Amino acid sequence: MTDRRSYQRDYQKEYQARTKRVNLLLSASEFRELERGAGRKGEAVAAYAKRCALDAHRGKQSAFLPEPILERLAELDRVMRTMANNLNQMARHSHRIAHVLDENEPFLYLRRLEDELRSALAATLRHAADAQGEEAPSPEEAPR
C-alpha cells in the first residue's frame, strides 16, 4: 500500500510541475458570449476559451476575425490561386506560340482581385469598428 501512496504522491508532484491552472472571472454576458462561440464550434467552454486565448496570443488571424470574414478571406485566397494559375497558363501558352492572345485579360483579373481585396478589407474594418463602437471608415478610406 505504501508503494501506491508514494507513487500517487510523486505523480501529483510531477503533474503539478508540468501543468498550471488559470482561473477566470467572467460576467454573465461574457460567459454567454463564450458559450455561444463554443457551441458554434462544438467545444466545451473551457477548451474554447483556452484555444481563443492561445490563438490571440500567437497572433493567429482566426482569433481576431469573425467566421464570415474568415470564410470570405478563404474564398479570396481561392480566387487568387485560380487567377495565378490562369495567368501562368496564359504566359505558358503565349511563350509557346510567341504571341499574347489577349493582353488585357491579365489586367482585368488583377483589377477584379483588387476590388475583392478592397471589399474584404472594408468589411473587416467595419466589423472591427462595430466591435469597438466606432464609426467605420468608408471603402475609399481603406488602405491602398
Image (spheres, rainbow, N blue to C red):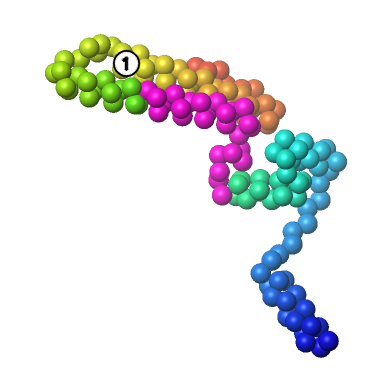
SS for callout 1:
helix
Work out whether 18 lies above or below 143: below
Furthest-front residue in this view? 1
The quadrant holding residue 107 is top left
Is residue 112 something one can see in this rendering? yes
Q: Residues within 10 Å of mark 1 (few under 14, many from 20)?
A: few
Quarter of the image with the C terminus is: top left
Left or right of residue 44: residue 137:
left
Q: Image quadrant of residue 65?
A: top right
Q: Position of residue 97 (x, y in %)?
A: 15, 18
Above or below, 10 relative to 33: below
Residue at horizontal 61 percent and vertical 24 percent from the top: 126
Identified at 76% across, 38% down, the residue is: 39
Q: State the image coordinates of residue 48 (x, y, percent, origin top left).
A: 71, 46
Identify the residue at image location x=78%, y=53%. Answer: 24
Q: Is residue 125 visible?
A: no
Determine which quarter of the picture holds residue 3. bottom right
Please say whether residue 45 is one of the residues in the magenta stretch. no
- Disc tally is 1
x and y percent of residue 1 in the render? 83, 87
Helix, strand or loop: magenta stretch: helix
5 or 23: nearer the viewer: 5
Q: Nearer the viewer, residue 25 or 100?
A: 100
Q: Which residue is mark 1?
A: 107
In the rendering, at what x and y percent does residue 64 appear?
61, 38
Query: Amino acid under label 1?
Result: Phe
Magenta-drawn segment: 58-83
Task: Give the residue at the far left of this rendering.
Answer: 98
Judging depth in this view, the residue of 65 and 16 nearest the camera is 16
Residue located at (33% from left, 22% from top): 86
Residue 77 lies within the magenta run: yes
